[in-house]
Amino acid sequence: MTVSPLPGSRDASPQTQISFLGVPAGELGGISVAGSRTGVHTGRLLAYSQGDGASFLPARPFAEGERVTVRARLRVGGAVHQLFDEFAIAYQDTISSTPETIHPGSPNEVQSFRSRSELHPPVVTVTAQSPAVAPGDEFVAPYTGPGQAGPMILDESGGLVWFKPLPRNTSATNFQVQDYLGKPVLTWWQGDISIHGFGQGEGVIADSTYTDIAHVKAGNGFQADLHDFQLTPQGTALITVYDPIFCNLSSVGGSADGAVVDGMLQEIDVRTGLVMFQWTSLDHVELNESYELARKATTSSPFDFFHINSINLDHDGSLLISARNTWASYDVNAHSGQIAWRLGGKRSSFTLGPGVRTAWQHDPREHADGSISIFDNGTSPKVHAQSRGIVVSLDPQQKTATLVSQIVHPSPLSADSQGNMQALSNGDWFLGWGQVPDFSELSAAGQLLFDAHLPAHDQSYRSFRFAWTGTPAHSPAFAMQPAADGTVTVYASWNGATLVAYWRVLAGPSTTSLRAVAEGARSGFETAIPLPAGAVGPYVAVQALDATERVLGTSAPVSGA
């Protein structure tokens, strides 16, 4: 049984629920919850959809600064065990959510389409492309630069496949393909990204028709952060959360009346929205492990000592966590919350071999052979000559970490923030360069096979390559453009359709008597199809066809009169 907040925690929120993970809800009883100031708290016990626990939701919030005592009975077989938990409620620091600056750029850095005039994604420029790349599309989520922000799928040549524009000052990150309940889905985080370097929003899960099937929110009074959103085989989500709280920082050279950003992770039951597990950095990592300077912090700009930026569910069930500002990756026991080992930073559990040391890193991921890949930013301030991807082998007996390989861009890039390193099925690596608007595929030997970039001020927190098949729930769209000579060109598109090979134009005197008058091969997101003279009927529609000319979708007919 794992109880969250973890016993002895000092940084729970006033809105916290008490999570009991590990046994069916029916095995729990006799739950009593009391605050040292607010007294006894009644509430509801709600079960997790997986049947492995429940959360107690207090009917009213706790008071900042008080201690909370939790008692419960746990039945295991014929035995009854007494559970006891005690934790403290932190004093919350409310800070500005000022968004990052948007750089509009120039008109030639933004795409536009006649058939979908509301879509204005940034232009993507491909500078290197080899037939040896791994199969699949590119997944990026541009923000802060020219064009609209939002998740975007690109084909192998960098052409637009799907784009979802988001409102101004709303951004998307972590756009990728994952499995949810046995089916491939699109997932991303969306919300506000503040100048403090973290986000406030929610995770989104969409199916192959681009229909949202779940919105995953943080619990315990928090909002989900931008840095990670990982689905598990059990139908849960691992998310990051940032919580600014008041803190005495005098032990690390800061103010006694200071504030710190507590980096945490939550496991959320997607179907119920309940918090199943919560881990906080302040409970397990000392402030002096940070490479940030506490003396620069204020209550309006708290000490971001940890800066959690990724979570990986390892093969043994442990959680691999990256903290940018301690330069370390942490292997965390998902039951006790205790740190099993540290890789890098000031208290590394391993002796680091040549080239292993990272700085301001992102995205450590465990692979089938036990090795770990890491995107090593190495800058802000600069520690390495350039950002890079590395693969590290760990020897748990000898406590050594050895560099297996290093992947760098042939034109050195330094990403002050963000970035990722994805292992592809053919042995290649796909790197998103974060704050630098590039994304690249390189072979295991380091050969550049694909390279593309967004406009200068755009950035994509992570970038990926995945195989994906999508058939939108909405119909194809088209627009007609008459010319001075009386001819007409039809512009057809279907935002997100991956199987379209041809377009067919239908025309006729009524909506029920349309016939094929023209056809053309798909030529990008929007295909121009010239019509023969006199073909407009006055009603016109378009059909999207696959490679066998099977009809995939038909637009609503429109009068061309």
Image: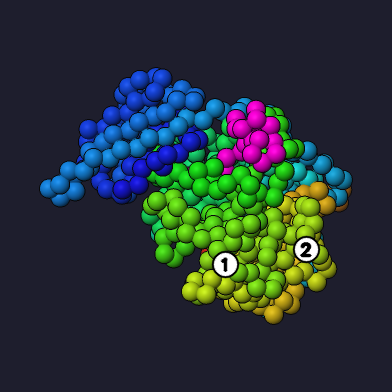
Q: Nearer the viewer, residue 432 or 10?
A: 10
Residue pushed farthest front?
251
Please identify the quarter of the rendering in which residue 505 is found.
bottom right
Q: Give x and y (percent) for residue 82.
A: 23, 40
Disc 1 packing (10 Å; few <14; some 14–19; many ≥20) = some
Mark 2 vs mark 1, foreground winner is: 1
Please give the residue where the numbered disc 2 appears in the rendered image.
384
Of the numbered discs in the image, which one, if any, rests on residue 350?
1
Amino acid at the residue labelled 2: His
Please identify the quarter of the rendering in which residue 539 is found.
top right
Location of the C terminus (image quadrant): top right
Sequence-wise first label, 2 or 1:
1
Magenta run includes residue 256: yes
Q: Give x and y (percent) for residue 544.
A: 60, 58
Amino acid at the residue labelled 1: Phe
What is the magenta range?
A: 246-266
Q: Nearer the viewer, residue 291 or 313?
A: 291
Colour scheme: rainbow
Say which element carries label 1: loop
| Residue at (42, 39) in percent of width and height | 8
Residue 13 appearing in the image: yes
**Whole-number angstrom distance, CA of label 2 to CA of label 1:** 21 Å
Q: Nearer the viewer, residue 407 or 494?
A: 407
| Residue at (72, 76) in percent of width and height | 446
Q: Give x and y (percent) for residue 392.
A: 60, 71
| Residue at (70, 71) in percent of width and height | 355
Magenta run includes residue 73: no
Callouts 2 and 1 close, C-beta under 8 Å: no
